[in-house]
Image (cartoon, helix red, strand yellow):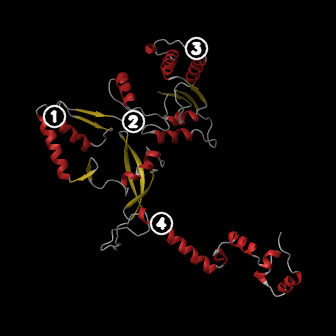
Amino acid sequence: MKERHDIEALRARLDGTRGREYWRSLEAVSETPEFKEFLHREFPQNASEWLDPVGRRGFLRLMSASLALAGVSACTRQPIEELVPYVRQPEELVPGKPLFYATAMPFAGSGMGLLVESHEGRPTKIEGNPDHPSSQGATDIFAQASILGLYDPDRSQTITNLGEIRPFESFVDAMRSLASAQTAKQGAGLRILTETVASPTLASQIDDILKRFPMAKWVQWEPFGAHNSREGSRLAFGEYVAPQYAIEKADVIVALDADFMCEGPAALRHARAFASRRRIEGLGTRNRLYAVESTPTNTGTRADHRLPLQPTQVEPLTRALAGRLGVAAAGSADLTGEAATWVAALATDLQANRGRSLVIA
């Protein structure tokens, strides 16, 4: 049982209290040991610092210092860098004002026209060049990511071997020993793997190596290159040619497992050309896109009609469609269900738009 409070004594004390000292309960006024213990648990020491702007800043300073000291063992010291002004400032360079350079990025054996934004000699942003026929002012994910190939402070600055830094002379010595071992075998164990090379200088250097080592082999490979289409062009025309699609002129487009808006060096130009026929204002007829694909693609999402098929069923559908269009060498293919219905509809639409249709495989 709590002891009774002297009401008259409490009233006398309340008459002399003002502001923050004003009472909240009888226990607060009486200042009993029980209430003091409760007050200590509910309002710890120095908690009032948060109500005082000056005290709050001091408390935050102490907390920040404590956190910094707690994590100092996990931090690394950055090297001291000196900022030195230009002795002879480069022409047209104004600190804080960007410069733009027109360039081309090699991609899948072709060049993509780009504009590179540079600040004080460091490239910072890449956009498409509106005056270049391949990009027409647009870029893709590969062009945007290529900024790391131009400037990346975390890229390797030295030659490494098995995780350890090695001088360039060590690399030359290692290559000389390998070349000496291959000389007797005329390069029978030498293989050169590259992406599609569009540089005449690099191609000439590799040709020199192949002349020195006639048994060596040079293989060019791209994750989604034009190898299949190049081989198809050789079978059809007797030589390697690159098809140039006038998508902006086509009223009917059939994509046979072809993501032509996102893959290949002309993807940006194809996407722009396709979109130009999708604008309502100033156009009499919109194009129609049929997509037959085994994997969902961005081109398929823009199609007016999309048919999902297994990869093994795309070729029979193509042969059946070619046969209906009069290609004698297409052979025969048995199709049933929705695929057969699609072939009949595609052949009818393509024949109705002869000269204004396009099939991309």
Question: Which mark's residue is nearer the viewer, 1 or 4?
Answer: 4
* Amino acid type, residue under disc 4 in the picture: Ala
Where residue 234 sits: x, y (%)? 34, 25
* Amino acid type, residue under disc 3 in the picture: Thr
Q: Residues within 10 Å of mark 4 (few under 14, many from 20)?
A: few
N-terminal-most mark, 4 or 2: 4
SS at badge 4: helix
Where residue 196 sits: x, y (%)? 33, 38
* Amino acid type, residue under disc 2 in the picture: Pro
N-terminal-most mark, 3 or 1: 1
Q: Which residue is mark 4?
A: 70
Q: CA distance from mark 1 to mark 4?
A: 61 Å
Q: Residue furthest right?
A: 8
* Amino acid type, residue under disc 1 in the picture: Phe
The quadrant holding residue 191 is top left
Label 3–label 4 contact, CB within 8 A: no
Q: Which residue is mark 2?
A: 223
